[in-house]
Amino acid sequence: MTKKERYQLFINHFSKKNPTAETELEYSNPYELLVAVILSAQCTDKRVNIVTKDFFRRFTNANELAEADVEEVFEYIKSISYPNNKAKHLVGMAKILVHDFNNVVPDNVDDLQKMPGVGRKTANVIASVVYNKPAMAVDTHVFRVAERLGLTSNAKTPLEAEKQLVKYLPEEVIPVAHHWLILHGRYICLARKPKCSECDISHFCKSFGKFD
């Protein structure tokens, strides 16, 4: 099977199974999504959604967060991984969002990465989810699943995986394909023990049979 054929099978399957796949992070505006994605680094979406309920009641917008003490922010997010760094990043992000971007979350990856706590993955999530741009965010799930399926080959870094995925995926599919890969990795293609017997795309998975 060629790589092109494998990509087509991947697109065909998920276009029918989950055509409107979306993030499991809970948010109501771009500011809230930006906060949630920063918090989600090395943390589960489920935990983030628990924390942000109270967080967004207290810091309803970037102005309020920009004026907050880091210590107070920490108290709201202390059950999240790396709360000290993330508290500093959130306040720093809000300050730049307010003062440099006139309180409008940027729509391009370069500007997004000017804010603390916003790496390429986070920037790609915002660009694709908020603005529907063809940006492929590569987290641990995407990196693992794409390699196992055979969509990427020997990618050593998330950026290498991103470049390979973007090369073969049609632009209009990229934003939703990010979620296809994440959700498949979260619920079926688990890191330590993938549920191959429950997988409905094993017929084109390059790694099928390797985890028995």
Image: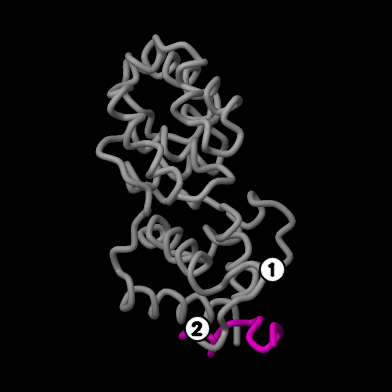
Q: Report the disc number at residue 194.
A: none
Secondary structure type for disc 2: loop
* Residue 208 covered by magenta stretch: yes
- Give left or right: position of 159 versus 107: right
Task: Please name the residue that numbered disc 2 is placed on.
Answer: 199
Of residue 114 and residue 94, the one placed in the foreground of this image is 94
Looking at the image, residue 96 lies above or below residue 159: above
Q: Where residue 177 sits: x, y (%)?
A: 43, 63
Q: Which residues are magenta?
A: 200-212
Q: Where residue 201 sits: x, y (%)?
A: 49, 84
Task: Please name the residue that numbered disc 1 is placed on.
Answer: 153
Looking at the image, residue 84 lies above or below residue 66: below
Q: Quadrant of the N terminus?
A: bottom right
Can you name the residue that lies furthest to the left here?
A: 28
Of residue 54 and residue 176, the one placed in the foreground of this image is 54
Q: Where residue 202 sits: x, y (%)?
A: 54, 86
Of residue 69 and residue 149, the one placed in the foreground of this image is 69
Residue lying at 64% horizontally and 51% vertically, measured from the top left: 158
Secondary structure type for disc 1: loop
